[in-house]
Amino acid sequence: MKLNPTKFTFGVTSGEFFGYIVTKRGIEANPKQIDALINLPSPRNTREVQCITSRIAGLNRFISRSTDKCLSFYQLLRGNKRFEWDIKCEEDFQQLKEYLASPPILAKPETGETLYLYIAVSSSAVSGVLVKEDRDEQKLIFYVSKTLDDAEKRYPTLVKLALAVIMSARKLRPYFQSHSIVVLTNQPLRTILHSPSLSGRMAKWAVQLTEYDIEYHNKTSAKSQVLADFLVELPPELIQTDLPDEKWSLYVDGSSSSQGAGIGIRLESPTKEILEQSFRLEFPASNNEAEYEALLAGLRLAQGIRVKKIEAFCDSQLVASQYSGDYDTRNDRMDLYLKAVKHLTDRFESFPLTRIPRSDNTSADTLAALASTSESHQRRVIPVKSIDSPSIVLPRGVCAVRELDASSMDAIELPLSDVVDEPAEQEPTTDDWRIEIMLYITDGQVPPDRWAARRLKARSAKYAESYAKIQAIDVKKFIWKNIICRHGLPYEIVTDNGPQFISDVFEDFCAKWKIRLSKSTPRYLQGNGQAEATNKTILDGIKKRLEAKKGLWADELDGVLRSHRTTPRRSTNKTPFSLSHGMKALAPAEVGLPSIRRTMLTQDSKRNGRMIKDSLDMLEEERNRALLRMQNYQQQIARYYNKRVKGRHFETGDLVLRKVFENTEEYRAGKLCAKREGPYQITNVVKPDVYELMTMDGEMIPRSWNSMNIKRYYY
């Protein structure tokens, strides 16, 4: 085998490689290609424009925002337009020649080096540049650019920025796979791409970007003159100057004492972002004057961030009543304060001032008290942290916690003589610990030893909870103990129309904790689909294990539940157990087999503990990935299912007919029974395809109904 001498070069300081000039300084554009483009005359027909664009394509990696610079050339080639080389095209052509007269030199990244990505968006293209830092100097690696089609031009600005990142990742895939990438942007890209509520193309892009090690940092000052094109990330026409027309909430409070006066401000946005400020008044002020100063400072803060609609709350009856006109101002100082407030409120589109109890204004009151008691001219930052456990060791038997009610937790004092002392060390046993608990619950059998019997009764109390009939109070206790106390307050609970869930007791409990209670529509199981799908899976598993003896289903329930919790779901690609606990469940076969998990990890407990903590740290990210995958999976199924579905949509006030079921059909009508009954009037749209109905006599139907079971009434 011989080497072709025309294709190999050894022992040289520079040379041509793949059409580029590689030197000690870096990668340079081929002078022959640049001269060929610079020496071209202005084109006279479409073919000569194609010649220009083909030569530009070979130099794209050296041209900053090449699509924006060459957009006029590409537009000449679109469609069957008549060739017209105008002044704009000639100016762009001459500017491109001036730019290529001194092309940039590209650098080569080192292994393991962090690279930085700048992105820019215009009305017609998205661009990016990959750079590296070398001795506090930013050196170019690659320019990329993409023309926006008609659909992409209508994307929102943040979606265009995300498109710039995903375009750079696709074109520079080798760099993204072998290096850590830092995206430098002043826009909230990280918040958008890591949001669990993503859907559509944004969710798809977010999943694709999880393959790489990407971080998002605020843009700093550019350290290279060649990055001047990326200093402006968005053109002026894409920058949103008007804030959403939504109402903000302002809580203010003033405090005056012998130590001084202070004010506290809490400004809350419609999306629940909070701005808190605390000021100390460096002049003598009464309590009413401090209240007015707090209101004026809050209005100036809201005006500074261009809020249009705001609702203010204070606990001062004097300030609220004087502003509404119920009270008169009896001195000049109060009159001047009132005029200053009205002068500022005239600049807002909406400004109601409401008096609230002091107990509802604790945040602003705390900030005001902090400012009034602090030392003058002292600036400080007070971090708020938490202490998880007491700093002292309580003696045995001091306090035991028992759940007495779903809305309260009380501490019960136990005498020292009733405390069960656990032995310091226990001998390992191979017996099943569940057997003695089952014998005690079913037959009342206890060990002969008094202390062993007491320990067994205490352990069995956790498992001996059964109900002959489930009442609303039982559901309330179950939600409190197993959901709220373990996992926190849920946002929404979806139930069927069982009497336990539609009772006033359970509805009042959800309203007290501000939990949204959604009931599935009757005769439409898909409304409670998650629970019904789980029940269907469990029932199928039990049926496959049982033969003729169907009454033994309880013996097979544990195995079916374990199989359900440890089997990966197609929608999430994860097991329910791993998403709940952060690691894979131990298979029963591993108990008797010397697997790596049971032999190696158990020998090094510290390392095993660190690995468990690492898994818990990544748990939230795994849940977000599973959520993105599940949403994409649901949307794909919905698109396929709805391809030929013609939806029924109604508005409030429409007349509809409801489908007749067994409990509402006419007695002994048989086949002659009417298929629909009504008409009913729609009074409320609960959510898409779910409606509340009312009879023509004004009587409300107690359940909401799905559009599948109602039909428009034509009259």
Image (spheres, rainbow, N blue to C red):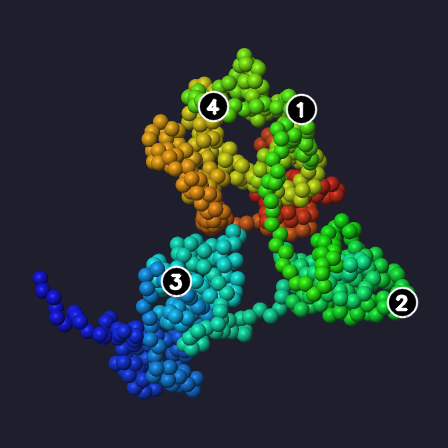
Q: Is there CB contact under 8 Å for labels 2 and 4?
A: no
Q: Which residue type carries mark 4?
A: Gln
Mark positioned earlier in the residue sequence (2 or 1): 2
Is mark 3 in CB contact (under 8 Å) with mark 2? no
First in sequence: mark 3 vs mark 1:
3
**How far, Cα to Cα, is label 2 from label 4?**
80 Å
User: Which amino acid is tagged 2?
Assistant: Asn
**Could you tell which of marks 2 and 4 lies nearer the N-terminus?**
2
Query: Are dots 2 and 1 in contact, CB under 8 Å?
Result: no
Image point 54% across, 24% down: which residue?
Answer: 422
Which label sits in the foreground, 2 or 4? 4
Residue on which the image places disc 1 = 415
Residue type, mark 3 in image: Thr
Give me the disc on residue 426: 4
- Identify the amino acid type marked 1: Pro
Which label's residue is closer to the chain start, 4 or 3? 3
Which of the two residues, 415 or 270, is positioned nearer the viewer here?
415
Across the whole image, how many numbered discs are drawn on residues?
4
Identify the residue at horizontal 41%, vertical 65% (top origin). Answer: 116
Q: Nearer the viewer, mark 4 or mark 3?
A: 4
Q: Is residue 469 left or right of residue 201?
A: right
Residue 594 placed where, x, y %? Answer: 33, 31
Q: Nearer the viewer, residue 362 or 355?
A: 362
Cα–Cα gap, marks 3 and 2:
66 Å
Q: Is disc 1 placed on a helix, strand or loop?
A: loop
- Judging from the image, what secondary structure is the residue with disc 2 in? loop
Residue at mark 2 to residue at mark 1: CA–CA distance = 65 Å
Residue 100, quarter of picture: bottom left
